[in-house]
Amino acid sequence: MSFHLHKFPLLSKSAILGRLIEENSDQDECTIKLSNIPGGAKSFELVARFCYGLKIELSPANIVHLRCAAEYLEMTEETAQDNLIHQAEMFFNQVVLRSWKDSLEALKTCDVLLPHAEDLHIAKRCVESLAAKASIDPDLFGWPVSEHGAMHSPGGSVLWNGISTGAKLGNFSSDWWYDDASSLSFPTYKRLISTMESRGAKEEIVAGSLTYYAKKCLPGLNRRQSMGPVPLTSAAATLSEEEQRHLLEDIDRMLPLQRGLISTNVLLWLLRTAMILKVNRACISNLEKRVGMQLDEATLEDLLLPNFSYTMDTLYNVECVRRILDHFLAMDQTMGGGSPCLDDVMGSPSLAPITAVAKLIDGYLAEIAPDINLKPPKFESLATALPEYARPLDDGLYRAIDVYLKAHSCLPEPEREHLCRLIDCQKLSLEACTHAAQNERLPLRVVVQVLFFEQLQLRTSIAGCLMVSDNLEGSSRPLHGSGTIATSGEAGARWVTSAAVRENQALRAGMDSMRLRLAELERECSGMRQDIRKLGGAAGKDGWAARVQRMFSLKMKLQMCSTEEAKMNDRHRSASAKLEKLQAKVSSHKKHLTIDA
């Protein structure tokens, strides 16, 4: 752009323009080329207006341009009093740096004025001003740093000329500056975060800001969490794949390595994005370690990481989940994880994380089991990675293996048996045992084991009922045949108590019959053990069919016995309740007799 200007207004304000005009003083009209002036033609137009004495409006949007252009043209106080450098510095220090919004706007303009803005320390002063305001805890004062210079009373109301208007300020949290900071270019934003850390900003605040910046500049997370298509943000749309890759690697290096600062689903999203962008191996390994530190807080949906390799491999990235699990187990061992008993697993809060991870991995195995490309060794490797005490019950593992056997119907019998050995039949619930006993996909050896341990559970429960019956009969014996002289009230109470005792004796007879049935079941169990020992023999097909029929007939007997046991338990509880009521009545009668005496 060409400007037709007079010589004197220019040389009276600018030392550079004065020397250039003097070099061409022999010409009536001289042509001066300013190719490197900061801000270009727009900045020079404002400078020319200032030289002519016209009023120019200083603002956060043009102050950095004018300051750099004035420095380039040497518009100092030696050339003219109250020159442009002086006025620009006064406005920058007294207006721009005191406001968060103005400092942010001025800092954005520094990106197109490098290295001039750096040489004049303009970018540094803006960053320090923003870092100081963002590092202040809003809880200390009840409100964040003032945006536009408005005055506020300690009670939170806005003041106008010292008079309270009654308008109240809203509640502010420590993340009030996240959105504004995310509008900065990443090199400038990185510089802001580094300055805040040097000022002692809290790690959770820094991590929250980095997460917010990543969500805004990297596509994917908002799209996954919503039902419909979400357009990319302007920052994500303008960044190339290479820039996004470097951005993610830098964010990973800047994130504090501490558990709980970032939610697990965000970390898994960052890991998924890192795989898509093909970042370096160190970044992926670091993200896997972060996820492993808090794997117990993950959800199954977020853990299903697709496999982005071009080879014919599994649908989901099972190796990545295995590495994440290894990181979690290593952390659990360093924190003093041991091998407790079952009661400790069920009740100890310190074992809650590893039991939650075991439940998560069992659900993950059930989800990936239908994948036809998932080989048994890979499935088994992930299932056996957890220690035995991590699973109070093996119901989830049984379900995952059942889904795998259903999806891989052509699996050979030896491999089926090898997979089923992962299940501890003693840790299956009654519902799982009932399902397994009727599951045609399980090998016959496993079905026999399930029936055997189910019979042991039934025997234990019946023995517990008999112990309760013995205790109840022993507590009722002192009520029989007292040697004292009884009144009519005591005799009535004793008659009612003896009736309850007779009912208890009938219950005792029923439990004796249950003992006989239990003895029959034990004989059947010994026959089953002999069948198990003969499984390796050369049995005929008809012989196997007879044994299977015998096992299922035993199953029916066990179910009938379980029904009888439930009935006996109900009668037992009814008799116990009656005895308690009768004992209360007898004690009440005795109190009345004592008072009458």
Image (cartoon, rainbow, N blue to C red):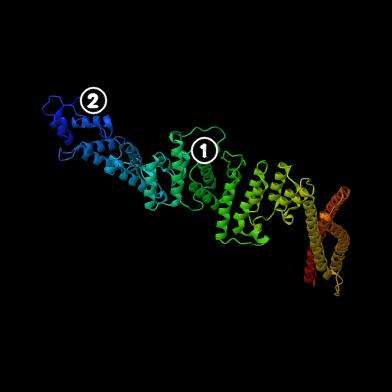
- Position of the N terminus, as image quadrant, is top left
**Which amino acid lies under the numbered mark 2 shown in the image of this protein?**
Ser
**Which amino acid lies under the numbered mark 1 shown in the image of this protein?**
Gly
Image spot of residue 85 (x, y percent): 22, 39
Q: Is residue 269 above or below residue 489?
A: above
Q: CA distance from mark 2 to mark 1?
A: 48 Å
The answer, for residue 93, to whether it is visible in the render is: no
Q: Is residue 512 above or below residue 553?
A: below
Image spot of residue 488 (x, y percent): 86, 68
- Helix, strand or loop for disc 2: loop
Extreme left residue here?
A: 26
Residue 404 falls left or right of residue 204: right
The answer, for residue 501, to whether it is visible in the render is: yes
**Picture disc at residue 382:** none
Residue that numbered label 2 is attached to: 2
Residue that numbered label 1 is attached to: 220
Choose the circle earlier in sequence order: 2 or 1: 2
Image spot of residue 458 (x, y percent): 80, 57
For residue 19, what is the image quadrant? top left
Please name whichever residue, 579 or 401, is drawn nearer the observer in this view of the structure.
401
Please name whichever residue, 159 or 442, is drawn nearer the observer in this view of the structure.
442
